[in-house]
């Protein structure tokens, strides 16, 4: 018996992915949960397992194809035990059908006898009804006229009631509240999370709205939002030859996410400089410990620890804003995303529970995730759950930049290249290593005074290597 192997849910919010490798061939015998293809989405590269055991009859996709959740990718000839189970079920079904047919035949014979005895009675009843029908027909015509008027009146009342409901089912902002719309509580919650107006969706879909409908509508809305923010392009070929290249999944996801973040988050940018002359000596003195543990002690590792301490001290920067419910979501854990540049684009793996780890532990983990990112081996779990992000461009150059807050996070810290500058200390100028810092944050949740206090604390902690460790 043939079975269909379909693309499962790859990750939260992931509806499609690109086939990067086919791990089996037609005619192969495979086990249940054995990987059959590898796919690459904008979040991670994962293997798709088989949902059943058997022999591969047909592979319906090729490497490089874009596949969607629920799409059939392989036709599988089921294993023998599955076929035997099906045969047993069919035999059992046939026996039940035979028993049912026998019982129906017996009932038919009894019914025929009863019908003969009742034929005479029916004839008498028909004769009586024929005499009464002429009188009743006149009365029926009159009743039908009255009923027709009543139905029209009821329809008018129902229509008026529906129009009234439509008018009251929207809030003051003009967005539908979802009243009168057929959708489960889970579907309504998903719609709130994705910012989908159930009223608008109900205009396109008749009947009950599913979670799949909400996701598809949200995806169309994101694409429409991204396209609407784009500038109409001229015909570039008028001035010379051009070449078009498709965006890879990571670049497409980046374009969509930064556009959504820029449009939804009111940004504020704060800048400061930190004297890291002394802390560089700290890094050099402890480099051997990090290397023995398998990592490298860098300014990013140190800043990850310092920022983790700052997030505990300034909880708004470790929170998210829920405008739908007008609430602030304060998190009791500290996860920090670290931007990593790769050949395919920017990836942001996450250091989980950074406040509970030592600088050496963070240094080792940073080395590992950076290597996984460059090798394309990050999983979706490696890139989920960040509350705040850090982006270090110091190795490339630049004096300052304004990173975009990755919603639903509330802030991101940018690090630029340090440089030696003359600093006036004890009545004289001294050469000091100065590090530029750029802080971007969500003004819906954080005010300018909070932002200044946050970056000032980080600056002071960088100038004192033990400040973050002591939690001062």
Image (cartoon, grey):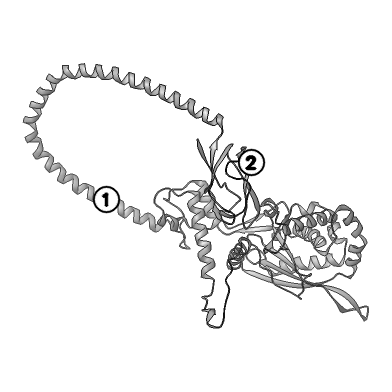
Indicate the quadrant where residue 226 lies: bottom right
Q: For residue 220, say whether it is visible.
A: yes
Residue where numbered disc 2 is placed: 34
Secondary structure under badge 2?
loop
**Residue drawn at x 74%, y 69% as measured from the top left:** 452
In depth, the one of 354 and 373 nearer the eye is: 373
Graded by Cα atoms within 10 Å as few (under 14), some (14 to 19) or many (20 or more), the crowding at tag 2 reads some
Q: Residue furthest bottom?
A: 239
Q: Nearer the viewer, mark 2 or mark 1?
A: 2
**Residue drawn at x 48%, y 46% as measured from the top left:** 184
Q: Is residue 38 left or right of residue 136?
A: right
Residue where numbered disc 1 is placed: 155
Residue 12: x and y, percent?
60, 51
Indicate the quadrant where residue 425 lies: bottom right
Q: Is residue 126 left or right of residue 197?
A: left
**Residue drawn at x 52%, y 39% as measured from the top left:** 3
Residue 278: x and y, percent?
90, 68
In depth, the one of 460 and 82 nearer the eye is: 82
Contact flag, marks 2 and 1 (Cβ < 8 Å): no
Q: For residue 52, say whether it is visible.
A: no
Residue 334: x and y, percent?
73, 54
Q: Is residue 30 left or right of residue 362?
A: left
Position above or below: 104 against 455: above
Q: How many marks?
A: 2
Mark 2 vs mark 1: which is more N-terminal?
A: 2
Residue 321: x and y, percent?
62, 59
Q: Which mark is residue 191?
A: none
């Amino acid at each position: 018996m043939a079975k269909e192997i379909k693309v499962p849910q790859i990750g939260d919010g992931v509806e499609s992915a690109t086939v990067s490798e086919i791990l089996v061939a037609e005619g192969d015998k495979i086990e249940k949960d054995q990987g059959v293809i590898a796919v690459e989405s904008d979040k991670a590269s994962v293997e798709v397992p088989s949902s059943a055991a058997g022999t591969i009859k047909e592979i319906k996709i090729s490497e490089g194809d874009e596949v969607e959740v629920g799409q059939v990718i392989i036709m599988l000839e089921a294993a023998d035990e599955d076929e035997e189970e099906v045969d047993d079920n069919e035999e059992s079904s046939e026996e039940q059908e035979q028993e049912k047919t026998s019982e129906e035949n017996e009932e038919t014979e009894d019914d025929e006898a009863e019908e003969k005895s009742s034929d005479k009675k029916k004839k008498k009843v028909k004769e009586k009804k024929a005499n009464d029908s002429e009188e009743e027909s006149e009365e029926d015509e009159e009743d039908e006229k009255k009923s027709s008027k009543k139905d029209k009146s009821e329809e008018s009342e129902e229509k008026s009631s529906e129009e009234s409901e439509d008018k009251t089912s929207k809030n003051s902002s003009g967005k539908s509240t979802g009243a009168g719309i057929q959708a489960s509580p889970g579907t309504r919650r998903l719609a709130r999370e994705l910012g989908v107006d159930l009223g608008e969706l109900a205009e396109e879909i008749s009947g009950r709205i599913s979670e799949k409908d909400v996701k598809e509508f949200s995806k169309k809305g994101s694409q429409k939002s991204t396209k609407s923010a784009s500038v109409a392009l001229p015909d570039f070929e008028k001035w010379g030859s051009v070449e078009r290249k498709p965006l890879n999944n990571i670049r497409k996801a980046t374009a969509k996410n930064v556009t959504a973040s820029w449009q939804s988050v009111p940004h504020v940018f704060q800048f400061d400089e930190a004297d890291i002359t002394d802390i560089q000596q700290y890094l050099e003195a402890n480099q051997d410990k990090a290397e023995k543990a398998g990592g490298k002690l860098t300014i990013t590792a140190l800043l990850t620890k310092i920022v983790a301490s700052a997030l505990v001290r300034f909880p708004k920067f470790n929170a998210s804003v829920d405008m739908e419910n007008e609430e602030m979501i304060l998190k009791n854990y500290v996860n920090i995303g670290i931007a990593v540049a790769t050949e395919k684009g920017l990836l942001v793996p996450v250091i989980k529970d950074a406040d509970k780890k030592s600088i050496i532990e963070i240094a080792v983990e940073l080395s590992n995730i950076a290597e996984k990112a460059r090798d394309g081996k990050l999983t979706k779990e490696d890139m989920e759950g960040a509350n705040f992000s850090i982006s270090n461009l110091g190795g490339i150059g630049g004096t300052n930049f304004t990173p975009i807050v990755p919603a639903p996070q509330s802030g991101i810290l940018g690090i630029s290249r340090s440089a030696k500058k003359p600093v006036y200390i004890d009545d004289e100028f001294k050469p000091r290593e100065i590090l530029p810092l750029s802080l971007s944050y969500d003004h819906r949740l954080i005010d300018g005074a909070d932002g200044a206090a946050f970056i000032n604390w980080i600056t002071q902690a960088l100038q004192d290597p033990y400040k973050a460790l002591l939690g001062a």
